[in-house]
Structures are given as structure tokens and as C-alpha cells.
Image (spheres, rainbow, N blue to C red):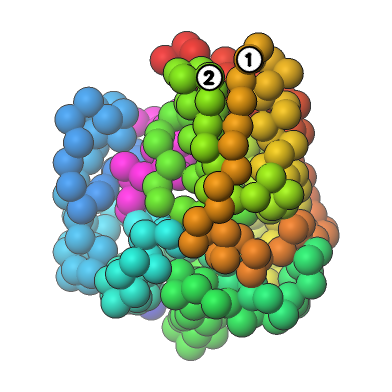
């Protein structure tokens, strides 16, 4: 690699569910001017656009990424731009082009500009042959195109680390729950939509069965895990750094609905599975995050009860 790492941060996919929260957290930590948010489009009024530097950036444009990194003195890039599972299955070619092609573009820019790269993975890397309590070394044979792109992304991160010494890091995100941005087209969107429906309509039609149990995490915990990993010394990181399992919650859609109904009188939920049930059934129920706990000492703060309280409070206050 050439050059010297700068001190600023670039975030791709800054208008998405994760990007919205991450940009806010990074700006609180490093100062607004030190965090450059980017996305394929502008969105007037969005916090990522209005509260600090923002650029329109196509993640398939390697030269464009490199130019911004060089001109702005970028040292770290958080690469969040991607098509999520449910959206990606409707357009597999576009999913592969953005998720794999975008990752290659970012890694190429990182090689040229000496960047530390955060490129998240997902529990979608697991498939039906993984145990329901997935360990770090469980088989990675996904049945979705989205999952395939995340397996490829982990392999690319390892390749650029091994061959070009690019400092790559990633977390296998579970379903993420946040009130600050709408769900982005993933299979676990029900765990976000249900809160808005409960408060606005008193009823929700859920697109998975009530007994569907998936790994989940409150967004604040996911952001803290991301910042913790990116702040860790390379000496503390082992062979799993391209896609760490992290400890998270595990609850069913029915348990989530029950927790909400305990707080909102009269709330009801019907369960009418659609094609997303197939994706959910191929994923594990829970995750073993012991390696990330050992290597960079991270554990979640929120349980189901505190997550539900925070979501209802946050949505009601907006």
C-alpha cells in the first residue's frame, strides 16, 4: 500500500438503516467535519446530509472513492452500501453487482489510499446445514443471493488482508432494530415495522410465523460493536476478523409481539408468512459470539425488554 492514513472517516450507504445511526455516532465521537457521509442519492432533511459533510458517491466508482479519500484525508471507511436480502432476491444480478462489485471498489481504493476498512457481513452467510446455534466456524452455504454476496465479501476481505495488507474488519450482523431510519428491505424488517404499526394502527400483519426465532440486536449495540471492532488493535484480532459472530438476542416474532402488547393495550398481530419465511428458515436461531468476546471484549447491553422500551419511546418522541 502507498501513502499515509488520514484522520477522517468516509461512510458509504449513509442514508440506510445502519448508516443513519453510524454516521450520527461517528460525528458525535470525532466531530461533524471529520465524518463524510455518502450515498448514491441525496435526501433533503436526512441527518446524514444536513448535519455534516455529504457527497453523492457510486460505490462501483473505484476512482471516485479514491479521489475523495485522497482529497479529504480519509483514514477509515465504513462500507455499508448494499442491497439487503429481500430486495436482493428480487434482482439477483443487481445484488451481486452492488454487494460484490462495491466491496471490490472499496477494497481497491483502500489498497491505494492505505485505509482501514469496515465491511459488514451478515448471519445470512449461514444456510440450512448450519446448526441452529451457529458458531464462528459453522458451514457457510447460504441459499440466498444476498447471503452468497456476504460470503464472497468475507473472502475478499481476507484476500486483501493477506495479499495487500489492507486492514479489513467485519461483523456478521444479525437482524438490527432501530427507530431512527426505516427498515431497508431485509428479512428481519418485521422486527422494526411491528413497532410503527403498533403505535400508529394498533395492529400488525407479520410476514413470518409466530415461532420464527432469529438473532437480533438493538441498533445501539450494533453501532457500539462496530466502533469497538474498528478501534481494536490489530494485534488483538484473529482469523475471524473478516466476519465475526457477535453475541446477540434470540427471540421469536411471537415473543416480540407479546412484549409489545404488554405495553400497548389492545395491540394485535396476525402472522401471514410470505416468501421471506423461507429465508428466515434457512438461518440460525442464535449465534455464538465467544470469539469476539475473547478477542475484543464486546457484549450487548440491551435485552428484549429494554429494546422494546427504547423502540416505543424513540418512535413516540419523533
Horizontal placement of 192 versus 107: left or right?
right
Q: In the orientation shown, which residue stands out farthest toward the bottom?
A: 163
**Position of residue 96 measured from the top left corner of the image (x, y, whole percent):** 34, 75
Question: Foreground: 228 or 220?
Answer: 220
Quarter of the rendering occupied by the N terminus: bottom left
Determine crowd level at label 1: few under 14, some 14-19, many 20+ residues with C-alpha closer than 10 A: few
In the displayed structure, would residue 95 be above or below residue 289?
A: below
Horizontal placement of 118 versus 131: left or right?
left
Residue at x-position 59% and y-position 37%: 270
Quarter of the rendering occupied by the C terminus: top left
* Kind of element beneath mark 1: loop
Prevailing SS of the magenta stretch: helix
Question: Foreground: 124 or 154?
Answer: 124
Question: Foreground: 140 or 254?
Answer: 254
Q: Is residue 29 magenta?
A: yes
In the displayed structure, would residue 276 be above or below residue 310?
A: below
Q: Earlier in the sequence, mark 2 or mark 1?
A: 2
Label drawn at residue 202: 2
Picture quadrant where residue 254 is located: top right
In the displayed structure, would residue 270 be above or below residue 160?
A: above
* Kind of element beneath mark 2: loop
> What segment is highlighted magenta in the picture?
12-33
**Position of residue 153 measured from the top left corner of the image (x, y, whole percent):** 47, 74
Horizontal placement of 318 versus 286: left or right?
left
Residue at x-position 33% and y-position 53%: 12
Amino acid at each position: 500500500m502507498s501513502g499515509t492514513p488520514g484522520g477522517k472517516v468516509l461512510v458509504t450507504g449513509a442514508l440506510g438503516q445502519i448508516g443513519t445511526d453510524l454516521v450520527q455516532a461517528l460525528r458525535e465521537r470525532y466531530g461533524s467535519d471529520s465524518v463524510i457521509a455518502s450515498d448514491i442519492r441525496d435526501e433533503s432533511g436526512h441527518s446524514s446530509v444536513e448535519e455534516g459533510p455529504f457527497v453523492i458517491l457510486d460505490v462501483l466508482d473505484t476512482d471516485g472513492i479514491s479521489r475523495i479519500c485522497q482529497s479529504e484525508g480519509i483514514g477509515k471507511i465504513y462500507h455499508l452500501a448494499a442491497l439487503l436480502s429481500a430486495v436482493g432476491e428480487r434482482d439477483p444480478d443487481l445484488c451481486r453487482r452492488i454487494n460484490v462489485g462495491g466491496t471490490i471498489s472499496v477494497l481497491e481504493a483502500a489498497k491505494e489510499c492505505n485505509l482501514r476498512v469496515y465491511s459488514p457481513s451478515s448471519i445470512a452467510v449461514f444456510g440450512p446445514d448450519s446448526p441452529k446455534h451457529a458458531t464462528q466456524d459453522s458451514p457457510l452455504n447460504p441459499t440466498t443471493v444476498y447471503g452468497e454476496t456476504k460470503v464472497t465479501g468475507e473472502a475478499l476481505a481476507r484476500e486483501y488482508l493477506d495479499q495487500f495488507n489492507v486492514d479489513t474488519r467485519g461483523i456478521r450482523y444479525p437482524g438490527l432494530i432501530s427507530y431512527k431510519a426505516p427498515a431497508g428491505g431485509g428479512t428481519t424488517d418485521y422486527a422494526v415495522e411491528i413497532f410503527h404499526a403498533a403505535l400508529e394502527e394498533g395492529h400488525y400483519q407479520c410476514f413470518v410465523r409466530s415461532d420464527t426465532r432469529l438473532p437480533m440486536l438493538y441498533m445501539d449495540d450494533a453501532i457500539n460493536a462496530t466502533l469497538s471492532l474498528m478501534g481494536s488493535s490489530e494485534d488483538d484480532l484473529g482469523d475471524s476478523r473478516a466476519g465475526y459472530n457477535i453475541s446477540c438476542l434470540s427471540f421469536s416474532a411471537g415473543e416480540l409481539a407479546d412484549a409489545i402488547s404488554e405495553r400497548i393495550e389492545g395491540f394485535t398481530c396476525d402472522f401471514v408468512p410470505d416468501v421471506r419465511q423461507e429465508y428466515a428458515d434457512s438461518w440460525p436461531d442464535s449465534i455464538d459470539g465467544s470469539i469476539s468476546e475473547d478477542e475484543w471484549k464486546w457484549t450487548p447491553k440491551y435485552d428484549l425488554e429494554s429494546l422494546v422500551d427504547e423502540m416505543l419511546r424513540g418512535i413516540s418522541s419523533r
